[in-house]
Image (spheres, rainbow, N blue to C red):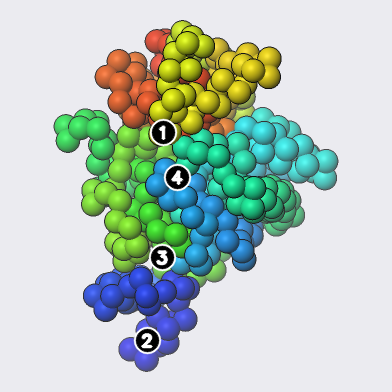
């Protein structure tokens, strides 16, 4: 047994760069891997319920790791291109349903976010070759801060103009990224076969409220398991409300969400693990940003994987019933726009604020109008009365999930943020009134001209409730 474990550890795909990992880090990763591999030696067939419903379900993955240097999204101070690969990154897809009613496709992807324009393009192209309709596609980003920059997602993140050579690499990756999302969606549709789906909710505790030590948190870990008719897991989807920001290095990787997928797939050989992010805009890992400490990110991923194993060994709720998909868009009003005089004053600053002001002035000089509202997509998938998934765009703070779970009279509410569009942070009324980064100052990085006007929270929650009542 020990020889087998050691061989498996040598084959693991951590892609360790020894110039960035000391002996202690390597030892931590080794033992994390041993724990995961030992867990995989246990029985992995999930208990089969007596009255399960069957769906046509397919899954697929494609590697989206660049083989050239490219700028990475998420940090103002990290302005250099990537220097290598810590961990392969992926787009993974789950297709549910047959062509009679039209399938659903959920794509999870290791990236900071997915712009609205890319979601529309992917839906259009997949729809040309299948029965997929726009409202039945959801794309959820892991919000890793060690993935390539793509056009349209936090375009002002560097607080300065991007050099032409760097922009050319971003353009190249954006096209590659879009093509791969189309590819993985079509592959999942082609993979559909009879399966059952089970749902459970666990708990993982490495997230904290980064605004306040006493602020709200959401430690729930919803899990969806797709299994074949022999009870073996084919796909496992989990969701956790926490920023994917343990790593800030210049090596490409998936951060704790990427390691969670790796550990789950070791525990359940032959399965496809997927991670989406909940309302974690104001939630950070307990240990904060740790630079190149990939061993910490791996341990956080292992915590999720072990909870998945615990859930899988216990009773799960059968997902059943007719699929009801709703999709709508609402206008979220922005606050009063800054005057040209205010922008000109700020434009003199040698900072991200100054760069943002100069970008807005350039728009005015071209005769463009500054945005006064955000066109915001909201999507829900209901599986009878057994499970409801909500998809909210942007960096949504935890208050939204807390309210939806407490105000909607059903047990199985699953809230995905960072889905379908990447407009900006989405504060609650509480966070908006408190101000700070999530409350308004981060808008400059998303190229929004000003903060939100009050009233967005009730608009968003009202739209979700309206969809769920249909």
Q: Are marks 4 and 1 in contact (CB under 8 Å)?
A: no
Secondary structure beneath dot 2 equals: helix
Which of marks 1 and 3 precedes in the sequence? 3
Secondary structure beneath dot 4 equals: loop
Q: Foreground residue, 15 or 32?
A: 15
Q: Is residue 439 above or below residue 453?
A: below
Which of marks 1 and 4 precedes in the sequence? 4
Q: Is residue 59 visible?
A: no
The quarter of the displayed image where residue 399 is located: top left
Residue pointed to by mark 4:
74
Which of marks 1 and 2 precedes in the sequence? 2
Residue pointed to by mark 3:
263
Q: Foreground residue, 271 or 98?
A: 271
Q: Residue 365: where, in percent of width, then height?
A: 64, 18
Circle 1 residues within 10 Å: few <14, some 14–19, many ≥20? few
The quarter of the displayed image where residue 259 is located: bottom left
Q: Residue furthest right?
A: 128
Secondary structure beneath dot 3 equals: helix
């Amino acid at each position: 047994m020990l020889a087998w474990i050691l061989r498996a550890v040598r084959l693991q795909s951590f892609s360790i760069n020894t110039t960035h990992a000391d002996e202690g880090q390597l030892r931590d990763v080794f033992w994390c891997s041993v724990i995961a591999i030992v867990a995989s030696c246990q029985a992995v067939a999930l208990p089969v319920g007596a009255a399960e419903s069957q769906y046509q379900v397919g899954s697929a993955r494609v590697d989206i790791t660049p083989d050239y240097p490219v700028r990475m999204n998420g940090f103002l101070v990290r302005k250099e291109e990537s220097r290598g690969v810590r961990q392969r990154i992926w787009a993974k897809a789950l297709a549910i349903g047959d062509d009679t009613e039209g399938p659903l496709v959920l794509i999870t992807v290791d990236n900071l976010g997915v712009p609205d324009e890319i979601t529309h393009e992917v839906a259009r192209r997949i729809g040309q070759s299948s029965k997929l309709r726009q409202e039945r596609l959801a794309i959820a980003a892991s919000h890793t801060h060690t993935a390539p920059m793509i056009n349209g997602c936090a375009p002002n993140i560097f607080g300065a103009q991007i050099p032409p050579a760097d922009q050319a690499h971003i353009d190249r990756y954006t096209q590659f990224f879009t093509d791969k999302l189309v590819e993985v969606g079509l592959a999942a549709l082609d993979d559909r076969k009879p399966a059952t789906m089970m749902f459970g909710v666990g708990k993982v505790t490495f997230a904290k409220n980064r605004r306040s030590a006493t602020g709200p948190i959401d430690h729930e870990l919803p899990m969806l398991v797709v299994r074949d008719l022999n009870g073996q897991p084919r796909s496992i989807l989990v969701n956790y409300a926490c920023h994917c920001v343990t790593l800030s290095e210049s090596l490409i990787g998936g951060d704790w969400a990427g390691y969670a997928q790796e550990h789950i797939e070791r525990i359940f050989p032959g399965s496809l693990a997927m991670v989406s992010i909940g309302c974690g805009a104001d939630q950070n890992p307990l240990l904060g940003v740790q630079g190149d400490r990939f061993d910490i990110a791996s341990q956080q991923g292992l915590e999720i994987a072990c909870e998945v194993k615990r859930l899988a060994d216990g009773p799960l709720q059968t997902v059943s019933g007719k699929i009801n998909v709703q999709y709508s868009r609402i206008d979220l009003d922005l606050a009063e726009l800054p005057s040209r005089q205010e922008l000109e004053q700020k434009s003199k600053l040698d900072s991200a604020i100054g760069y943002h002001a100069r970008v807005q002035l350039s728009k005015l000089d071209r005769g463009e109008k500054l945005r006064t509202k955000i066109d915001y997509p909201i999507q829900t998938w209901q599986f009878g009365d057994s499970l409801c998934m909500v998809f909210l765009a942007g960096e949504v703070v935890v208050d939204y999930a807390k309210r939806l779970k407490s105000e909607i009279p059903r047990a199985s509410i699953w809230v995905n943020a960072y889905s379908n569009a990447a407009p900006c942070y989405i504060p609650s009324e509480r966070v908006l009134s408190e101000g700070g980064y999530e409350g308004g100052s981060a808008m400059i990085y998303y190229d929004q001209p000003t903060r939100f006007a009050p009233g967005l929270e009730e608009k968003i929650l009202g739209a979700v409730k309206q969809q769920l009542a249909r």
